[in-house]
């Protein structure tokens, strides 16, 4: 095999935690091949763009980044440009790459991350073969003046076109276990418990880019978390597009061994010594069980925080989104959660301007937000995704109406967040310190059990420790305090 040792790599990640964690796996795989990390993309021999396709601006940012890679390709003959993630899963994107981005060397998908090192070797080998043939033909590596202020290495672009590998699978029937991961933090980790999504919300591209739901065996998850804890991890975030539909079949299951649901998994994880905090993302309101709500009160390490995307406060819109719950059902869940854990913090996702959304529908979203009093919210302008049902709906909301509603929603949400954060002033909270805060300042930041971001004076070596912090200031998106 061709050697990758010593090559420097840089990964650019767009999108959700699922992608962030995939990038940790990709980094782990490259380090295992003897590659080294390059902090600065300009120093890299290999760049991987891990893409997201959730909204149109994610697509745009990707193509912008691809454009920049062309310069790097022109300057370094052996440079390898790789594209993966959710955009790679879509045929029209691969066609665009084939036709208009000849400097991309390797495209792989969300189902074959484990094949990445092998594919890289194949690209390197194909290049060696190509270069040999080129030499035999007497072709020189011409440096031409490119369209920008940089020079374009004709050979490397030509070689990319000839030796490029595009390997993407629609879906995968199995889960690959035992992959390495280069974690961003020593003290906290993401753990996938399931992959894919079966829900087909009518606006969403994810079921098309991540395939159908597949749950990992519970034993594999427990072993991974135990190993992480032995390695110093104190907080895990369990990942899945809808963790509430986790169905883990025990290995070598006999007929009397039942399938584990998400709550079974939480109770088992809660028994792992050394694990202080369990979080999860994301919970679909349609599948949230009373047993899980009860677990919030009973489990020592399950954090008092839930991200519960509502998307809209109007049952009519929710129906057209194919969300399979109503406004009333959602509000009832919130009531039960608060009954079980009175100071639970709640965040959400809201889409504004879904096709057919009227001012009355939007008012229902505003009133629901006020009623729930979210601690924080991610608000999005509806973005039609090619291939999803809602993109074809005839009653698209005009851009200016979407923007105007969006501004009103953000104002309401920020008002609520700021008010809720003010209530923390004077309280002492336990913060798991993540590391240095803003550059140039002598602050450290971290999260409370309820996922509130807290800034406080401190030093780098606090990272990974639990610190009691007295809150002195409540801002819209964070808290400030003093360690005590
Ligand atoms: N699986 C998670 C969410 C994944 S996508 C869940 O079901 O909650 C994250 C968020 O992006 C979604 O909750 C939704 O609010 C938003 N989103 C998804 N598709 C979108 C689109 N086409 N336009 C705008 N926002 C979208
Ligand atoms: Fe998308 Fe809906 Fe699946 Fe979430 S549950 S990933 S919003 S289809
Ligand atoms: Fe984006 Fe794919 Fe996540 S589309 S939001 S990276 S699952």
Image (cartoon, rainbow, N blue to C red):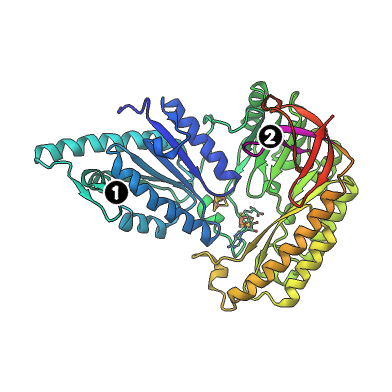
Callout 2 crowding tier (Cα within 10 Å): few <14, some 14–19, many ≥20: many
Q: Pick whichever, 223 or 256, lies toward us.
A: 223
* Label of residue 401 in the image: none
Does residue 133 appear anywhere in the picture?
yes
- Over which residues does the magenta segment extend? 429-448
Q: Residue at x 67, y 23 (%)?
A: 232
Instruction: Tell me residue 30's x, y (percent).
Output: 44, 31
Q: Is residue 151 magenta?
A: no
Choose between 343 and 323: the one closer to the eye.
343
**How many neighbours does mark 1 have within 10 angstroms: few (below 14), some (14-19), or many (20 or more)?**
some
Q: Secondary structure at mark 2?
A: strand
Residue 37 horizontal side relative to residue 185, left or right: left
3D distance between C-alphas at marks 2 and 1: 45 Å
Foreground tag (2 vs 1): 1
**Image quadrant in which you'd find residue 184:** top right
Q: Is mark 1 within 8 Å of ligand 3?
A: no
Q: Mark 1 or mark 2, which is nearer the start of the sequence?
A: 1
Q: Which mark is residue 150?
A: 1
Near-viewer residue (27 or 42): 42
Q: Magenta part mainly helix, strand or loop?
A: strand
Q: In the image, residue 204 lies at what x, y percent? A: 58, 60
The answer to whether residue 178 is above or below residue 306 is: above
The percent coordinates of residue 108 (x first, y second) are: 41, 45
Residue 268 location (% of width, % of height)? 75, 31
Q: Which mark is residue 236?
A: 2
């Amino acid at each position: 095999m061709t050697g990758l040792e010593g090559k420097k790599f840089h990964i650019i990640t767009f999108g959700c935690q699922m992608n962030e964690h995939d990038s940790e796996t990709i980094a782990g795989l490259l380090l295992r091949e003897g590659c080294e990390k390059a902090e600065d993309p300009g120093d890299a021999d290999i760049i991987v763009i891990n893409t997201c396709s959730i909204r149109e601006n994610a697509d745009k940012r990707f193509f912008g980044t691809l454009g920049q890679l062309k310069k790097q390709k022109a300057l370094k003959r052996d440079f390898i440009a790789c594209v993966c993630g959710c955009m790679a899963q879509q045929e029209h994107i691969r066609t665009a790459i084939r036709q208009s981005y000849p400097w991309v060397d390797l495209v792989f998908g969300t189902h074959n991350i484990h094949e990445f090192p092998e594919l890289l070797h194949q690209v390197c080998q194909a290049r060696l073969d190509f270069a040999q043939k080129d030499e035999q033909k007497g072709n020189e590596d011409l440096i031409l003046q490119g369209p920008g202020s940089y020079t374009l290495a004709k050979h490397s672009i030509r070689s990319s076109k000839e030796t490029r590998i595009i390997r993407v699978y629609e879906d995968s029937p199995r889960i690959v276990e035992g992959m390495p991961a280069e974690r961003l933090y020593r003290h906290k980790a993401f753990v996938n418990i399931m992959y894919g999504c079966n829900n087909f919300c009518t606006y969403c591209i994810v079921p098309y880019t991540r395939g159908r739901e597949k749950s990992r065996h519970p034993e594999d998850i427990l072993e991974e978390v135990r190993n992480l804890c032995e390695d110093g991890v104190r907080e895990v975030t369990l990942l899945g597009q809808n963790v509430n539909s986790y169905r883990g079949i025990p290995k070598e299951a006999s007929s009397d061994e039942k399938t584990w649901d998400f709550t079974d998994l939480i109770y088992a994880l809660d028994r792992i010594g050394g694990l202080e905090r369990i979080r999860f993302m994301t919970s679909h309101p349609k599948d949230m069980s009373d047993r899980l709500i009860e677990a919030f009160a009973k489990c020592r390490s399950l954090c008092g925080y839930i991200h519960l995307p509502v998307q809209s406060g109007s049952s009519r819109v929710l129906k057209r989104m194919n969300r399979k719950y109503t406004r009333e059902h959602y509000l009832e869940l919130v009531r039960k959660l608060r009954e079980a854990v009175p100071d639970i913090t709640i965040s959400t996702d809201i889409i504004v301007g879904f096709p057919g959304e009227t001012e009355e529908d939007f008012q229902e979203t505003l009133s629901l937000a006020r009623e729930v009093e979210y601690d924080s919210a991610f608000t999005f302008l509806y973005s039609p995704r090619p291939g999803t049902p809602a993109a074809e709906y005839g009653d698209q909301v005009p851009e200016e109406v979407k923007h105007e509603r969006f501004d009103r929603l953000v104002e309401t949400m920020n008002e609520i967040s700021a008010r809720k954060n003010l209530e923390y002033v004077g309280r002492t909270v336990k913060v798991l310190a993540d590391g240095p805060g803003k550059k140039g300042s002598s602050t450290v930041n971290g999260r409370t059990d309820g996922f509130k971001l807290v800034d406080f004076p401190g030093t780098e070596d606090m990272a990974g420790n639990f610190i009691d912090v007295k809150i002195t200031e409540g801002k819209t998106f964070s808290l400030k305090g003093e360690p005590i």
